[in-house]
């Protein structure tokens, strides 16, 4: 985990994470209409309450398991979830990853963040020697990340860990300072 001071020194806000409320909200809003329809709710006024309950339940478990979300809704919010709702909730982790990836892409663009190290650089990642294979672009589709091959972990050819740029050397290369307006769904 990168310390907040790293971002402040670069004059930018921290990298968006899957655990951020705004990221989770985007993911949950993706399934919200299906949840409301499955529940047979028709009153538009109930939408905000359903969203708040889902945010609370998914936040409690990091939105990683549909059954756990349903169980939390049953126990803590008085819901009566069935298997159809659990199946909908099972999609939340994928939508959360997608929302985080999009938020990081917006963060990279808006703050003009770029990697500090070149491809091919030898680095140490969690105490293991590795080499930077990629800056997260192309087939890896991991904005703001390196792909680091660590041979001692069995990585061959184009295999590697996807690692945030700033996790390798504790630096952020950004044009900063904060722009007056920020584009993207999480920065509105």
Image: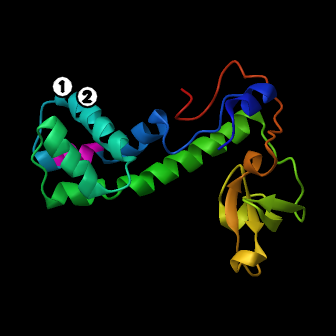
Label 1 element class: loop
Give the image location of residue 40, x and y in percent. Answer: 10, 44
- What residue is at 24 percent from the left and 60 percent from the top? 87
Residue 2 located left or right of residue 17? right
Using the image as rendered, state which of residue 138 and residue 155 is in the foreground: 155
Residue 82: in magenta span: no
Determine which residue is flagged by label 2: 48
- Per the model, the C-alpha gap separating discs 1 and 2 is 7 Å
Q: Where is residue 68 in the image (x, y as percent from the top left)?
A: 26, 53
**Residue, far top:** 180
What percent of the width, then of the height, locates residue 47?
A: 22, 32
The image's mark for residue 34 is: none
Which residue is disc 1 drawn over? 45
Seen at 69% across and 56% down, the residue is 163
Q: Give the range drawn in magenta.
A: 32-37
Display coloring: rainbow
Looking at the picture, tell me which residue is in the foreground, 66 or 112. 66
Tally the numbered discs: 2
Q: In the visual, does 38 lie left or right of 187?
A: left
Location of residue 154 (image quadrant): bottom right
**Quadrant occupied by the N terminus:** top right
Label 2 residue SS: helix
Residue that appears at 76% across and 59% down: 125
Residue 158 visible in the displayed image: no
Dot 2: within a 10 Å radius of its alpha carbon, few (fewer than 14), some, or many (20 or more) residues?
few
In this rendering, does residue 51 appear at all?
yes
| Image location of residue 48, percent across then percent down | 25, 28
39 left or right of 126 in image: left
Closer to us: 161 or 35: 161
Contact (Cβ within 8 Å) of mark 1 with mark 2: yes
Classify residue 12 by image quadrant: top right
């Amino acid at each position: 985990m990168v310390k907040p001071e790293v971002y402040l020194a670069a004059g930018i806000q921290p990298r968006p994470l899957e655990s951020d409320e705004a990221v989770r909200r985007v993911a949950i809003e993706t399934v919200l209409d299906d949840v409301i329809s499955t529940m047979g709710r028709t009153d538009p006024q109930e939408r905000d309450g359903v969203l708040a309950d889902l945010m609370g339940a998914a936040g409690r478990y990091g939105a990683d398991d549909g059954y756990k979300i349903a169980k939390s809704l049953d126990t803590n919010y008085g819901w009566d979830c069935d298997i159809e709702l659990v199946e909908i909730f099972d999609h939340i982790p994928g939508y959360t990853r997608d929302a985080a990836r999009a938020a990081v892409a917006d963060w990279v663009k808006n703050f003009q963040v770029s990697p500090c190290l070149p491809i091919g650089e030898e680095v140490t990642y969690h105490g293991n020697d590795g080499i930077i294979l990629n800056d997260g672009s192309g087939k890896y589709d991991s904005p703001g990340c390196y792909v680091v091959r660590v041979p001692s972990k069995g990585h061959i050819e184009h295999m590697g860990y996807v690692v945030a740029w700033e996790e390798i050397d504790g630096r952020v290369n950004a044009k900063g300072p904060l722009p007056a307006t920020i584009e993207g769904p999480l920065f509105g």
